[in-house]
Amino acid sequence: MKPRADEELFDQKKYLEDSCKPKCVKPLIEYEACMKRIEGDDSGEKHCTGQYFDYLFCVDKCVAPMLFSKLK
């Protein structure tokens, strides 16, 4: 079914990500702890990329099975 021109589209992925975030608290806490540890680093050498990707992976893993069933 094609959406009408006056019908607003809804981003299912954003909604599903928000519903999955509570399931990924542990990686989020680890990322926030890392950010706090490197807060004063002015060298730019320290980063929390690994922890951030762990958090995103957790959210994406939760979203994927639900998202593809909603796509048309």
Image (spheres, rainbow, N blue to C red):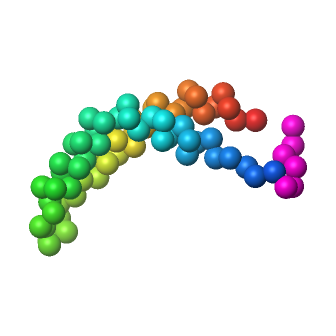
Image quarter hosting the C terminus: top right
Is 41 drawn above or below residue 9 in the view shown? below
Identify the residue at image location x=18%, y=51%: 34
Q: Which residues are magenta?
A: 1-6
Q: Foreground: 7 or 28?
A: 7
Q: Is residue 47 left or right of residue 8?
A: left
Question: Magenta: predominant secondary structure element?
Answer: loop
Residue 15 occupies quadrant: top right
Identify the residue at image location x=12%, y=55%: 37
Can residue 70 be seen at all in this image of the molecule?
A: yes
Image quarter hosting the N terminus: top right
Where residue 10 sits: x, y (%)?
Answer: 68, 47
Q: Is residue 72 magenta?
A: no
Residue 69 occupies quadrant: top right
Identify the residue at image location x=14%, y=72%: 42
Where residue 65 sits: x, y (%)?
Answer: 56, 27
Where residue 32 sits: x, y (%)?
Answer: 23, 50
Can residue 60 be seen at all in this image of the molecule?
A: no
Identify the residue at image location x=46%, y=30%: 62
Is 46 drawn above or below residue 44 in the view shown? above
Q: Is residue 2 magenta?
A: yes
Where residue 25 sits: x, y (%)?
Answer: 30, 36
Q: Is residue 49 left or right of residue 23?
A: left
Q: Foreground: 16 or 45?
A: 16
